[in-house]
Amino acid sequence: MHPTGVASAAWVFASAPSKVPFYLAGGLLAGWAVLLSATGLTHPDFPGSAVRARLVMLGTAVLVAATLTSAVLTAGKEGAAEGAAASAAPSSALQLDRRPDRAAGL
């Protein structure tokens, strides 16, 4: 049998939207940025023509839009299971007890 913490954690992860599209789009955008910077540093005439410059800008805009869209679509709200787990967490409040017989100096 699984402990209840493991079962509730599995339920939370199963109900959350997958972040894989965001990671894929963000990774492609980062790779594109590295590729462009390396090409720009090694080729002084990069991109070479107005058509190529527009294609580079279009590719960059598409990757930025894909990354932003996937970030918005995969962003999740706090679910009912997460809220219940957070409210059921034990309080770490410090309880002090002052006894007259334990006063300082006595």
Image: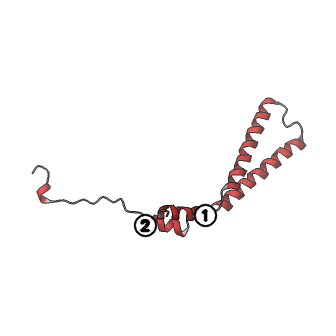
Mark 1 or mark 2, which is nearer to you?
A: 1
The kind of secondary structure element at disc 1 is helix
Residue appearing at x 11%, y 49% in the figure: 105
Q: Which residue is mark 2?
A: 88
Name the residue that disc number 1 marks.
14
Give x and y (percent) for residue 37.
Answer: 75, 36
Residue 42 disc label = none
Please say if 24 is above or below 47: below
Colouring convention used in this rendered image of the protein: secondary structure
- Residue drawn where x is 15% and y is 60% of the image: 99
Q: Nearer the viewer, residue 41 or 73?
A: 73
Q: Mark 1 and mark 2: span between their CA atoms?
A: 20 Å
Confirm or deny contact between disc 1 and disc 2 (CB under 8 A).
no
The residue at 37%/62% (across/down) is 91
User: Of all residues shown, which one is farthest toward the front?
Assistant: 1
Type of amino acid at the residue the image marks with label 2: Ala
Q: Position of residue 14 (x, y in %)?
A: 60, 63
Viewed as shown, does residue 105 lie left or right of 5?
left
Note whether 43 is above or below 104 in the view shown: above
Neighbours of disc 2 within 10 Å: few (<14), some (14-19), many (20+): few
| Residue 60 spot, x, y in % from top left | 78, 47
Q: Between disc 1 and disc 2, whose residue precedes?
A: 1
How crowded pointer 1 is (Cα within 10 Å; few <14, some 14-19, many 20+) is rated as: few
Image position, residue 85 (x, y; %): 47, 65
Q: Secondary structure at mark 2?
A: loop
The residue most toward the left is 106
Q: Quadrant of residue 47?
A: top right
Q: Is residue 96 left or right of residue 71?
A: left
Residue nearer the viewer, 18 or 62: 18
Position of residue 59 relative to residue 74, above or below, is: above
The amino acid type of the residue labelled 1 equals Ala
The answer to which of 85 and 78 lies nearer the viewer is 85
